[in-house]
Image: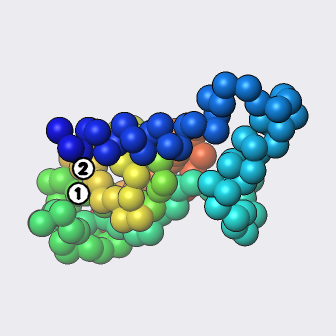
Amino acid sequence: MIRIASLLTLFCLMTAPLFAAEPSSDTALADDMAAATQAATPPPQEVAPTLDTDKVSTISVVEFVVAQSIKNREPVDVASQYTATPERLFAFTRINTKTPQTITHVWYRNEEKRAEIALRIGASPAWRTWSSKAIFPKGPADWRVEVTSEDGTPLAETRFTVE
């Protein structure tokens, strides 16, 4: 109860000049309000120049590899050449982005598109995601996987061969 009374007293003391019965003039009241505002406003701080976000990429690929498996959200058995045809390979991507968005892994076998996999990513300096692809048909081939942004801009690519 005492606390509420103290708050009411404080409120009345703070607002009394604003609700004076007869201010000497509108100008005097405006000057009083301007002085109160200036007293409550912290001094201006230096602001770093802002970057034009249209000209600066908001996404970058930190790591992009092909691996035989993923364990604990990390690539395992990374290679660029496979002597035996694996059943499945994984394209692992570590992304730095300030905004959630969708990237796409596009898999090519001998320059023919074989798969396109959309992956939703969050805002992070090291977001990890991956896609996988069954390596079919079996046999020798040159493969590549491309990472593209939401608007289709290529961000990175990795190549590997199967002999």
Q: Residue at x 57, y 54 (%)?
A: 58
Q: Secondary structure at mark 2?
A: strand
Q: Is residue 84 above or below residue 88?
A: below
Q: Residue at x 75, y 50 (%)?
A: 35
Residue 119 image offset from top left, x and y in percent: 34, 42
Vertical placement of 31 versus 41: above or below? above
> Would you call the spot at circle 2 few (<14 residues within 10 Å), some (14-19), or many (20 or more)?
some
Query: Which numbered marker is on residue 129?
Result: none
Name the amino acid type tagged 1: Leu
Which residue in the structure is indicated by mark 1?
A: 89
**Label 1–label 2 contact, CB within 8 A:** yes
Would residue 91 be found to the left or right of residue 99 on screen?
left
Horizontal and vertical percent position of residue 44? 72, 63
Question: Where, quadrant-wise, is the C terminus in this rendering?
Answer: bottom left
Front in this rendered view, residue 8 or 53: 8
Question: Which residue occupies 23% across, 45% down?
Answer: 3
Q: Secondary structure at mark 1?
A: strand
